[in-house]
């Protein structure tokens, strides 16, 4: 069932995404160029990592990231296994990029193109779609985001269905205020670290998930 759209989600959200991503690319271009050069100098392989992901209405697009791992590392990646900072395939410079989420800035290109939004459910792998229950598929009613509700509430510490609870909650409550809150908390997480914002004993999300 499609979520009823508000004026903000239907019209203004995309316009803001376009303007903010364009301005961000222009302002951050010196940093992005330096990152690209250091990636090329630091290890063999392309500057960008590109991978197919399902977007809005499950339409497949190619997501961009600055490459943080050795060449062809994805060939040895197991589906459903999160990549952590201790993964030996991550380059030294890649660890820095991941710590401060700089690798994700390449997705400003996806936002500008209309594949993604600044805030929304993070783009998942196509292989996950067949694992989703019907209620989880609501996450595909909107564009995936650079950051999202799940990313400010545990992110890699959450399992797939726990993330889905947050993703669906976001989709059902899209508003300008909620997007601003998520963006501000994301900035805090980038500078202070993800572990500072994780309540690992919180059982509320698990209870919500079991009721679905």
Image: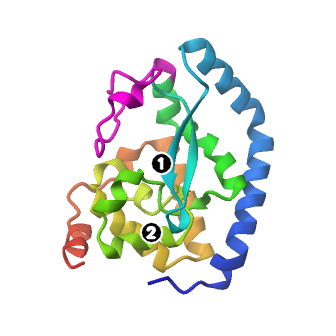
Residue, disc 2: 139
Q: Between residue 113 and residue 201, name the one nearer to us.
A: 113
Q: Which residues are magenta?
A: 70-93
State the residue at coordinates (57%, 46%): 62
Q: Per the image, is 91 magenta?
A: yes
**As drawn, is 174 to the left or to the right of 130?**
right
Labelled pair 2, 1 in contact (Cβ < 8 Å):
no
Q: Between residue 69 and residue 194, name the one nearer to us.
A: 69
Residue, disc 1: 189
Q: Is residue 58 above or below residue 100?
A: below
State the residue at coordinates (20%, 66%): 203
Colouring rule applied to residues: rainbow
Which mark, residue 11? none
Task: Quadrant for residue 10, please give it.
Answer: bottom right
Query: Number of labelled discs?
Result: 2
Dot 2: what SS? helix
What's the distance in space between the residues labelled 2 and 1, CA to CA? 23 Å
Dot 1: what SS? helix
């Amino acid at each position: 069932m499609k979520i009823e759209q508000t004026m903000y989600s239907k019209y203004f959200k995309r316009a803001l995404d376009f303007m903010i991503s364009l301005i961000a690319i222009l302002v951050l271009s010196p940093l992005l160029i330096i990152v690209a050069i250091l990636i090329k100098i630091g290890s063999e392989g392309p500057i960008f990592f590109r991978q197919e992901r399902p977007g809005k209405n499950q339409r497949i697009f190619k997501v961009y990231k600055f490459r943080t791992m050795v060449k062809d590392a994805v060939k040895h990646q197991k589906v459903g296994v999160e990549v952590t900072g201790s993964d030996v395939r991550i380059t030294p410079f890649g660890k820095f990029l991941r710590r401060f989420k700089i690798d994700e800035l390449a997705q400003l290109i996806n936002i500008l193109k209309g594949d993604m939004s600044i805030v929304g459910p993070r783009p998942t792998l196509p292989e996950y779609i067949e694992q989703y229950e019907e209620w989880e598929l609501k996450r595909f009613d909107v564009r995936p985001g650079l950051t999202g509700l799940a990313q400010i509430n545990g992110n890699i510490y959450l399992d797939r269905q726990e993330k889905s609870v947050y993703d669906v909650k976001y989709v059902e409550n899209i508003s300008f205020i909620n997007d601003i809150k998520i963006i501000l908390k994301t900035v805090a997480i980038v500078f202070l670290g993800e572990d500072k914002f994780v309540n690992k004993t919180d059982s509320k999300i698990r209870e919500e998930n079991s009721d679905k």
